[in-house]
């Protein structure tokens, strides 16, 4: 596991740690999530440096970060991924929380964008043993999601069937849908729209998907 204890530990940034690895801190108005993590994780001394190469936020609840570590004496450079779960507390002085999980710890969040994955150093140059297994498994799940979307694009008007039925808090349960617009779907029954509500969810979580003619 990559040690983050010396990354982003500026004494000017007061921080309180909450239960189970969550860190809460004030994020100023107008500060993007990427800028926040650059302040948190960028680090440099006479021997080494760490730098956020890129950061992408997915569905507002998870930030995926490509973090570069460089050893100055040798020029050795390695890039690994961190998945940060996010929390927002707008009425608190500590209004922004995150829980970082290194890729070699096997994060459950696995919607890392392709642009982040392509920046990473191959796992065989980063990890050994169980850490390597977990990192490879995590990257594999992320690539599976990316490829599923590429192989079965959900364009407007397309009808499709999920492998498992999708249950909603409205009480509806469907496994056949039509794409209304991006990230919006209506339930079908025998080819007829039976729901007037538009649902937002990720169909690929219930795949593989099958197109309905």
Image (cartoon, rainbow, N blue to C red):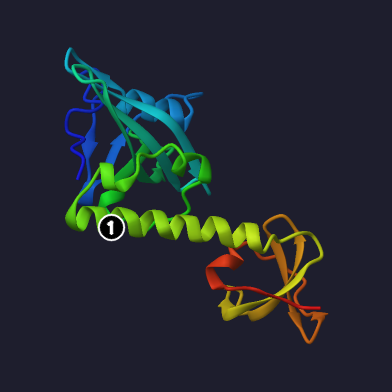
Residue occupied by mark 1: 134
Residue 166, image x, y percentages: 58, 76
Which residue is situated farthest in the bottom direction here?
190
In this orientation, which residue lies closer to the viewer: 160 or 166? 160
Q: Specify whether 194 is left or right of 96.
A: right
Q: Specify whether 191 is left or right of 151.
A: right
Which residue is situated farthest in the top direction here?
46
Helix, strand or loop for disc 1: helix
In this orientation, which residue lies closer to the viewer: 175 or 169? 175
Which quadrant: the N terminus?
top left
Say above or below: 122 vs 147: above
Identify the residue shown where x is 19% and y is 58%: 130
- Give the image quarter of residue 108: bottom left
Which quadrant: the C terminus?
bottom right
Q: How many marks?
A: 1
Say above or below: 152 vs 19: below
Residue 48, image x, y percentages: 21, 20
Identify the residue shown where x is 63% and y is 57%: 150
Say above or below: 179 vs 177: above
| Residue 113 makes an appearance in the image | yes
Residue 148, image x, y percentages: 58, 62
Say above or below: 173 vs 77: below
For label 1, the crowd category at 10 Å Cα-Cα, with few meaning under 14, some 14 to 19 and many 20 or more, is many
In this orientation, which residue lies closer to the viewer: 87 or 205? 205
Identify the residue shown where x is 79% and y is 87%: 190
Residue 11, image x, y percentages: 19, 19
Identify the residue shown where x is 77% and y is 71%: 196
- Give the image quarter of residue 129: bottom left
Q: Specify whether 172 is left or right of 98.
A: right
In this orientation, which residue lies closer to the viewer: 71 or 37? 71
| Residue 102 makes an appearance in the image | no
């Amino acid at each position: 596991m990559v040690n983050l204890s010396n990354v982003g530990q500026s004494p000017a940034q007061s921080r309180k740690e909450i239960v189970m690895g969550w860190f809460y801190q004030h994020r100023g108005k107008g500060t993007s999530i990427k800028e926040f993590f650059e302040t948190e994780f960028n680090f440099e001394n006479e021997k080494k440096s760490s730098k956020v190469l890129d950061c992408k936020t997915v569905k507002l609840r998870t930030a995926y970060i490509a973090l570069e570590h460089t050893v100055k004496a040798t020029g050795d450079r390695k890039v690994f991924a961190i998945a940060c779960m996010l929390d927002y507390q707008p009425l608190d002085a500590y209004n922004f929380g995150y829980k970082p999980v290194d890729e070699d710890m096997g994060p459950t969040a696995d919607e890392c964008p392709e642009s982040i994955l392509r920046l990473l150093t191959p796992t065989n140059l980063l990890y050994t043993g169980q850490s390597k297994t977990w990192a490879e498994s995590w990257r594999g799940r992320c690539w599976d999601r990316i490829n599923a979307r590429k192989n079965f694009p959900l364009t407007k008007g397309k009808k499709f069937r999920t492998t498992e039925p999708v249950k909603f808090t409205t009480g509806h349960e469907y496994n056949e849908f039509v794409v209304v617009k991006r990230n919006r779907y209506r339930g079908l029954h025998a080819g007829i729209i039976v729901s007037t509500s538009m649902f937002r969810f990720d169909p690929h979580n219930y795949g593989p998907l099958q197109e309905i003619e």
